[in-house]
Amino acid sequence: MSKNYFLAIATLFGAITGAGFFAVPYVAAHAGVAMFLVYLPVLTAIQILLHLLFARLILSTKSAHRLPGYVEIYGGKKYKSVVSFFSLISGYGTLLAYIILGGTFLFGLLSPQLGGSLFIYALIMFAAEALIVLADIKLIAGAEFVLSSFLILVVGLIAAKSFFHIDYHNFLTLDWRQVFLPYGPIFFAVAGDAAIPEVCRLLSREKHKIKSAIIWGTVLAAVILAIFVLIVVGVTGTNTTADTLSGLRGVVGNGIITMALFFGAIAIFSSCLVMMQSVREIFWWDFKINKNISWGFAVSVPLILFLFNFTNLTAVISITGAVMGGILGVVLVSLLPTMEKKPQQESILKTSISRPWAIALCSLFVLGLISELVRWIF
């Protein structure tokens, strides 16, 4: 296998293991591990399908776009504004989650030595990310490979230190009132669509490997997530904290938690750069707005939301996951027939879906979106 193949897997793996990775244990602890184990394989399979459909869309089109641009090409201009609205909601929600969680990790890592408030650390991290995107500094795909390897190491250390502290009674908790709670966060946690263009770019000379890289990148992320959630919930149960790591400190010790906080901060930092650039490119590529003004649009909205105290991490990830998964899913499935009939160029990927399954999936996406909005808004 080539170097780029492994880099492509690591890039997708790294994009998936962002804020959602650290938010899922909390909802799994409150809804029940059984519900988590039902949702995870189903939503992982659906995300693999969506990743493959998105890759086929990219490979079938000659020019580079984000989702609104593809909608304009294959669906018509009248749908572009609607899809842009929802794409930006999901992008801004993801960036807001990164501000909240990135600030939490940086605060836990540096405040014991330097002092200061969580609010200040969150602003410092987001400002650094925004300046990097403005300067057009690109992350090397190899950095994601290192981060992914480090994540597996940290999860392994946490598992080794925590194994004999697991209380198996924590796996038996099931709250039927919270049965739909895991949907949004888990859908968010296994989503890596922002990295699919980079996966296609890395394997532009080995297109026959794209499908395999997408499947492996998504499945590996889901497996590591499952191990992480089971360990955390097994140890802390319903006392699992929203950021996960602070609740583990008394069990695994400060050394491993410091390592995990360091990794978490770096992982959130790199994922935030990818998402911020993605939101910027919606304005820049699809609406032909000056790239610096586009940067301002990408940065300002999540920052304003944070300043106005939209800081409930679980709510942000739940709504964003449902919107991101639901809208992306409906759009990709809806564009598929037109893309298959009139592609701009031939794609090596032939991933498709039958009409009955398309209707069933779109119904699931819409119901999931509505249920999450009702839960958190009303």
Image (cartoon, rainbow, N blue to C red):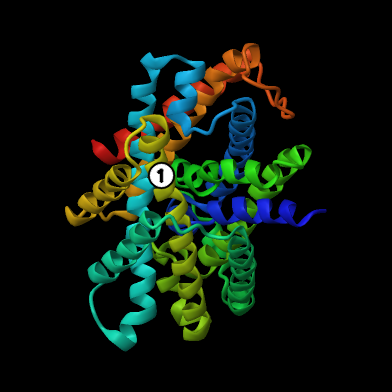
Residue 50 in view in this figure: yes
Where is mark 1, residue-wise? 178
What residue sits 54% from the left and 19% below the top?
335
- Percent across and percent down for residue 290 are 32, 39
Give the x, y percent position of residue 146. 62, 67
Q: Residue at x 33, y 44 (%)?
A: 92
Determine which quarter of the picture holds residue 356.
top right
Where, quadrant-wise, is the C terminus in this rendering? top left
Q: Residues within 10 Å of mark 1 (few under 14, many from 20)?
A: some
Image coords of residue 274 (percent x, y): 47, 51
In the rendered image, the residue lying farthest to the right is: 1
x, y percentage for residue 162? 58, 76
Q: Amino acid at mark 1?
A: Gln
Identify which residue, 213 or 172, lies in the foreground: 213
- Residue under the point 26% across and 55% down: 311
Relative to 337, 187 lies left or right:
left
- Report the front residue among 73 and 109: 73
Q: Nearer the viewer, residue 199 or 220?
A: 199
